[in-house]
Amino acid sequence: MSPFLPKPLNCFPQNLTQCLNFEPLSPPKQPEKACSFSTFPKLKRKTIRKGSQDLHLHAQDQMNRFKVVSFSCVWAASLVQEAYILQFMYVGEAPANWEKVLQGIRQMRSSADEHEPVAHEETADNTVLPKERRFAVLASSILSSQTKGHVSRGAAQCLHENGLLTAEAMNKADEETIKKLIYPVGFYTRKASYLKKVANICLMKYDGDIPSSIEELLLLPGVGPKIAHLVMIRGWNNVQGICVDTHVHRICNRLGWVLRSGSKEKTLTPEETRQRLQLWLPKEEWVPINPLLVGFGRSICTPLRPHCGECSVSSFCPSAYKEASSFSSKSRKITLNKKP
């Protein structure tokens, strides 16, 4: 058993080598004395050549066999590793008081609609084709990444006013024009390039429409898990998962909602947070939790020095006052160490 593999669970074979019916071959014995090939008689030279060829074929056959066994070992090891990871994750058990926390956050949010991640893709024009509306959803979602809501909404409105919120029009448009229209969204130069590439793919592969699955959406430039799930919800009305951005990721970790069972280890990425959150959060909460926590994260549970004194659910939060106090203590140390 490789020392790099985790300890296998009871449901897996203890001896992976035996399970695969693989018996290591002993290396061929070396000749006791070295000798020159030219000193052998001609008849023996022929025998030696044939034996050498047979040995080469045998070695090649064993190498192919080793490759198959190596692949089988890696495949079996991946199953062991996956099971090892899964045993640390929640199995549908929700954290205590999560409903009270959500209710308290809702009461603190006077206007959740103001903080919708993408509120600009809907249009009152009933003449817009469904595929054009869906492309507008996709383009607006790409613009919304790492950008404040009012900025991304303004950029999408500029594209709409110039008739560029369709795959065909955007594919024909100059990238510099797109760049100027979407400024000052975050990473506007990169996003202009993404929009051009996405428009071309949607036009060539989907006849101006957008992909209808998470897997296909994730293949598009500039589309990650959060945007893919957002587009599935708003474009196709199909809830496949939770939209987890930096706000949702941060708040869920502060509340202790996505920690590994029996430990204090936090999730490292928004995607990991999404997977663990979906294990226990009821599906009817998957859509509203994003705008709710985004607004809460911008106003109260901020990235630096959260306003725990203004939070009505701080009594349920294991991280309450800890980050603010540590920040203050650092500032106090710096101030005390300064020379007059």
Image: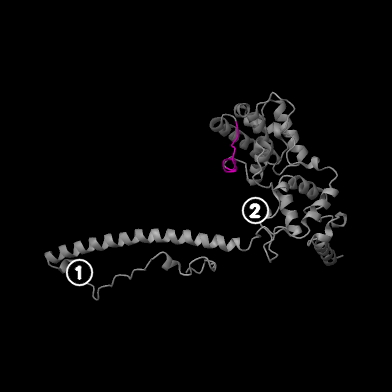
Residue 211 within the segment the image draws in magenta? yes
Badge 1 local density, few (<14 within 10 Å), some, or many (20+)? few
Mark before the other along the chain sequence, 1 or 2: 1
Q: Secondary structure at mark 2?
A: helix
Decide if residue 210 is on the left or right side of residue 296.
Answer: left
Residue at 69% across, 55% down: 280
The image quarter containing residue 255 is bottom right
Decide if residue 67 is on the left or right side of residue 239.
Answer: left
In this view of the protein, which residue sits in the foreground, 174 or 267? 267
- Find residue 275 and name its label: 2
Decide if residue 275 is on the left or right side of residue 151.
Answer: left
Assign the C terminus to one quadrant of the image. Answer: bottom right
Residue at 20% across, 69% down: 36
Relative to 224, does residue 166 appear above or below in the rendering? above
In this view of the protein, which residue sits in the foreground, 235 or 330? 235
- Find residue 36 and name its label: 1
The image quarter containing residue 135 is top right
- Find residue 204 and name its label: none
Badge 2 local density, few (<14 within 10 Å), some, or many (20+)? some
Relative to 96, does residue 31 appear above or below in the rendering? below
Q: Main secondary structure of the magenta part?
A: loop
Decide if residue 29 is on the left or right side of residue 263.
Answer: left
Give how far across and how far down residue 123 sits, in percent. 73, 29
Give the amino acid at mark 2: Gln
Q: Nearer the viewer, mark 1 or mark 2?
A: 2
Distance from Cα at disc 1 to Cα at disc 2: 67 Å
In this view of the protein, which residue sits in the foreground, 128 or 159? 128
Give the amino acid at mark 1: Ser
Report the span colored magenta: 209-218
The image quarter containing residue 337 is bottom right
